[in-house]
Image (cartoon, rainbow, N blue to C red):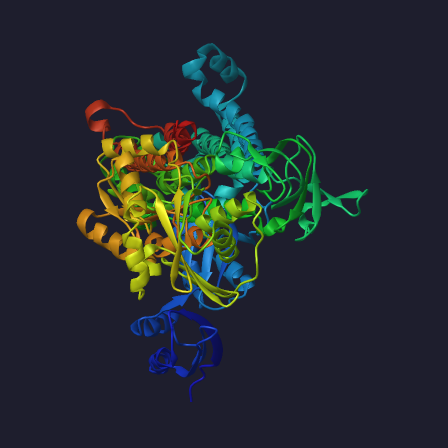
């Protein structure tokens, strides 16, 4: 009888549309050996599965994938991982996490020290943390608040303290051992008062203090990793420094165990290895702190308190965490706006550059939306809050940047595979070096064997390879955020430079998105007053920019709205409604004339209106043509320069819009765009993007509306204008917080420079190891007599990571304009 126990899990499945889909999924799951029952809820998109504990998650995933549907993650856990030093550590944590039942995917960033874990079904956090701790690392739950950030300052201060201790203790050993070369007279003076045995005993005491105080971390972590058969950088340091230290102990206290010519002590390299590597780690921690400066800056924008109105004459300062939706908050001149909201009283100019990258203050009036963290330069504002601090735009921006920083580029997978075997290979090379020098090396061969084997262990640097990609991504995404450019994932950062074709929506993307009425043509028997009141009353219920322009025009002309019924929006065409028993249609000419020959005939007499380089909006009342309203929208001033730059860089440009052909062609002529697709429906935009991909390769689509969402999703890189709809922003890979298209040029330049920076880092990291490891092994000795000291190896190893970090930090000073 089997002792296998059973359990019940729930998984999320997307894409199901009907009962047939449900049956297909249930049948596929039930075919998996070990699954006793499967019940799928179509409305909730959840599958309830009863199964034995020996069923693997991959079997469930494959069963669902066979049906053509996809499994959705149920949640994401974020953990702060303490103690990682190199890419081998990252690989070890990821492999450990992926062995946990219920973990769908795991990504660990060495730069941010954050593990992002996607769950197939709920898994206790304690179980995840326990598995990480069994791998030799500490893990704590990353708080999902706006104030949560790794404290690099404390980390760097701790390392600096250990470095100073190691330096103070190592310096006397260095002076004693190297004094004969640097200060012969001083060395002779010491030699007359202290015997060699006393000197070695003194060095032993100092070296022991270095090993067990500042160097303790390397040994505890390194030995633990060796025992777990997952050696890392700490293992290399502990073996290298420990071998020199133990050899010196034998030479000090048991010299008879060694050949006479090999009785030497190596306390100096044993201690200086730790000292210089601590120096490197301190510089690394400081550099990592600078890479997260963008996030720290964003977090620093959030005020700690808000001045909340409790009555007309009374206010109270309360913590930002206690702000709820609907509260009224006062903001005085020079103060930061504490939370997202709407101005209900007062006016002023608000500096939003820290969020959108826009350099000019924005005039805020009653009804204007404001963003938490921005600066009220002048004027007194009363704001009604729209979001809590946890759900604010600023918090979302920080979350987006952090998510992008923890993700990996495809090239990182190759690096991870190399680093997985890097340390074991170094251990093998060190062993071969020791044996080779012991067998064929000159006298004292044991000393030569020890020194060169230790040099190989110390000079090898998996850290540089592990940091090469994530540090550049971390700096670049932070730098982008400073300019109001938000990469939602690291892959889009890489893909943007590979784009050959940019497809643009027109309204709100190439134009300023503030359409205005330029002309209204009224047809008998209808009157101007009647048509304007009818159109405005219907359009009042629409969110389209043109609708808002019409409503504003009516308001400016003191037109009163009246009640309507049966409002219906037909995406890509127009809207229809009932008003006082009349059937109202407003939209494109195609929409109004559909199945109405009478209106088609009437419009044929007014072709001049349709030939204008403007957007015609036709209005029908009870099947009669009532009006044609011409809408114009100005091009963004920077659009000319941006398009010219794209042409100069041999980029293909396409205009894809639902607007009238003449209006679209007018814009295309102004911007020298050859490919124009007008009067396009939302689903047709997706088809056009597919066609462009087939013809030109990688395509980016830039848009801002709900009808752009399918095209944004289809493109290799979907780019949403920050002033656009939530749907567009949710679908996009890249968000431009400002509507200024210069930010698109900045994003492309940053993408190009980031990938170049990553290639430089990887080239250096691999070249360093390929060239210096053979030199450390003594390959130059037969030709030049040159050997690399373990101390110099430690300095080189420490500086290799610092070089990668310094190179990544160059992206902070990159001029994007």
Return the residue found at the far front.
525
Q: Nearer the viewer, residue 315 or 617?
A: 617
Q: Nearer the viewer, residue 1 or 606?
A: 606
Return the residue found at the far bottom.
1
Residue drawn where x is 25% and y is 35% of the image: 672
> How many numbered discs?
0
> Taking the image as drawn, is residue 746 in sight?
yes
Q: In the rendered image of this protein, does residue 70 appear above or below residue 360?
A: below
Question: How far from the left and from the top, in percent, is residue 376?
Answer: 63, 33
Quarter of the rendering occupied by the N terminus: bottom left
Return the residue found at the far top.
185
Quarter of the rendering occupied by the C terminus: top left
Q: In the rendered image of this protein, does residue 446 appear above or below residue 93?
A: above
Q: Nearer the viewer, residue 547 or 232?
A: 547
Question: How far from the left and from the top, in percent, is residue 535?
Answer: 48, 55
Return the residue found at the far right.
313
Q: Nearer the viewer, residue 301 or 458?
A: 301
Q: In the rendered image of this protein, does residue 207 appear above or below residue 124?
A: above
Question: How far from the left and from the top, in percent, is residue 520?
Answer: 42, 46
Left or right, 165 with respect to 117, comes to right
Question: How far from the left and from the top, in percent, is residue 281?
Answer: 47, 35
Q: In the rendered image of this protein, does residue 537 appear above or below residue 183?
A: below
> Taking the image as drawn, is residue 432 in sight?
no
The quarter of the displayed image where residue 168 is located: top right
């Amino acid at each position: 009888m089997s002792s296998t126990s059973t359990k019940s899990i729930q998984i999320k499945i997307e894409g199901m549309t009907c009962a047939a889909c449900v049956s297909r999924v249930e049948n596929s799951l039930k075919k998996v050996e070990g699954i006793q029952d499967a019940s799928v809820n179509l409305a909730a998109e959840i599958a309830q599965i009863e199964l034995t504990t020996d069923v693997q998650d991959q079997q469930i995933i494959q069963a669902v994938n066979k049906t053509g549907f996809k499994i959705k993650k149920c949640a994401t856990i974020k953990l702060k991982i303490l103690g990682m030093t190199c890419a081998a550590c990252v690989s070890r944590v990821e492999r450990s996490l992926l062995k946990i039942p219920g973990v769908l995917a795991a990504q660990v960033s060495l730069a941010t020290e954050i593990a992002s874990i996607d769950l197939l079904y709920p898994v206790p956090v304690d179980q995840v943390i326990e598995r990480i701790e069994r791998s030799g690392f500490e893990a704590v739950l990353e708080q999902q608040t706006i104030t949560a950030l790794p404290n690099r300052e404390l980390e760097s201060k701790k390392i600096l303290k250990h470095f100073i201790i190691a330096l103070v203790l190592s310096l006397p050993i260095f002076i004693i051992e190297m004094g004969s070369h640097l200060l012969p007279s001083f060395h002779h003076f010491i030699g007359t008062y202290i015997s060699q045995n006393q000197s070695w005993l003194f060095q032993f005491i100092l070296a022991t203090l270095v090993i067990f105080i500042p160097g303790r971390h390397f040994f505890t972590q390194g030995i633990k990793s060796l025992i777990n058969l997952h050696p890392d950088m700490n293992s290399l340091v502990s073996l290298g420094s420990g071998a020199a230290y133990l050899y010196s102990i034998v030479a000090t206290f048991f010299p008879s165990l060694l050949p006479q010519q090999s009785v030497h002590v190596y306390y100096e390299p044993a201690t200086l290895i730790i000292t210089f590597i601590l120096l490197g780690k301190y510089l690394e921690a400081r550099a990592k702190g600078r890479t997260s400066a963008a996030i720290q800056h964003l977090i620093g924008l959030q005020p700690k308190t808000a001045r909340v109105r409790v009555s007309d004459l009374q206010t109270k300062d309360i913590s930002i965490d206690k702000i709820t939706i609907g509260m009224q908050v006062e903001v005085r001149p020079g103060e930061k706006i504490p939370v997202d909201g709407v101005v209900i009283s007062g006016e002023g100019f608000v500096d939003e550059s820290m969020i959108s990258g826009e350099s000019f203050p924005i005039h805020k009036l009653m009804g204007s939306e404001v963003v938490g963290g921005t600066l009220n330069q002048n004027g007194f504002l009363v704001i009604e809050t729209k979001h809590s601090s946890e759900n604010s735009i600023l918090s979302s921006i920080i979350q987006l940047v952090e998510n992008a920083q923890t993700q990996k580029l495809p090239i990182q997978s190759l690096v991870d595979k190399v680093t997985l075997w890097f340390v074991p290979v170094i251990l093998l090379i060190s062993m071969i070096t020791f044996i080779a020098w012991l067998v064929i090396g000159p006298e004292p061969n044991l000393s030569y064997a020890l020194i060169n084997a230790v040099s190989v262990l110390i000079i090898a640097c998996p850290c540089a390879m592990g940091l090469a990609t994530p540090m550049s991504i971390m700096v670049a995404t932070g730098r982008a955020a400073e300019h109001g450019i938000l990469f939602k994932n690291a892959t889009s950062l890489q893909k943007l430079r590979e784009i050959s074709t940019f497809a643009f929506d027109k309204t709100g993307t190439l134009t300023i998105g503030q359409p205005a009425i330029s002309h209204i043509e009224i047809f008998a028997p209808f009157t101007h007053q009647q048509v304007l009141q009818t159109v405005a009353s219907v359009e009042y219920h629409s969110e389209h920019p043109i609708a808002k322009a019409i409503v504003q025009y009516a308001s400016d002309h003191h037109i009163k709205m009246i009640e309507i019924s049966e409002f219906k929006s037909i995406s890509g065409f127009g809207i229809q409604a009932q008003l006082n028993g009349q059937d109202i249609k407003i939209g494109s000419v195609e929409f109004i004339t559909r199945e109405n020959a009478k209106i088609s005939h009437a419009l044929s007499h007014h072709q001049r209106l349709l030939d204008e380089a403007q957007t015609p909006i036709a209005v029908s009342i009870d099947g009669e043509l009532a009006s044609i309203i011409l809408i114009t929208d100005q091009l963004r001033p920077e659009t000319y320069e941006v398009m010219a730059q794209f042409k100069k860089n041999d980029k293909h440009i396409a205009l894809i819009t639902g607007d009238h052909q003449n209006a679209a062609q007018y814009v295309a002529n102004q911007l020298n765009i050859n490919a124009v697709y007008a009067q396009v429906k939302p689903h047709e935009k997706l088809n056009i993007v597919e066609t462009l991909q087939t013809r030109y390769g990688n395509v980016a689509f830039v848009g801002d509306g709900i009808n752009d969402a399918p095209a944004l999703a289809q493109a290799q890189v979907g780019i949403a204008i920050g002033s656009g709809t939530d749907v567009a922003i949710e679908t996009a890979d890249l968000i431009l917080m400002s509507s200024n298209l210069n930010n698109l040029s900045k994003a492309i330049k940053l993408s190009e420079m980031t990938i170049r920076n990553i290639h430089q880092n990887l080239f250096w990291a691999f070249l360093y190891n390929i060239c210096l490891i053979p030199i450390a092994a003594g390959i130059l000795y037969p030709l030049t007599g040159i050997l690399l000291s373990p101390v110099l190896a430690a300095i080189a190893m420490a500086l290799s990571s610092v070089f990668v970090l310094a190179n990544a930090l160059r992206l902070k000073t990159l001029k994007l304009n």
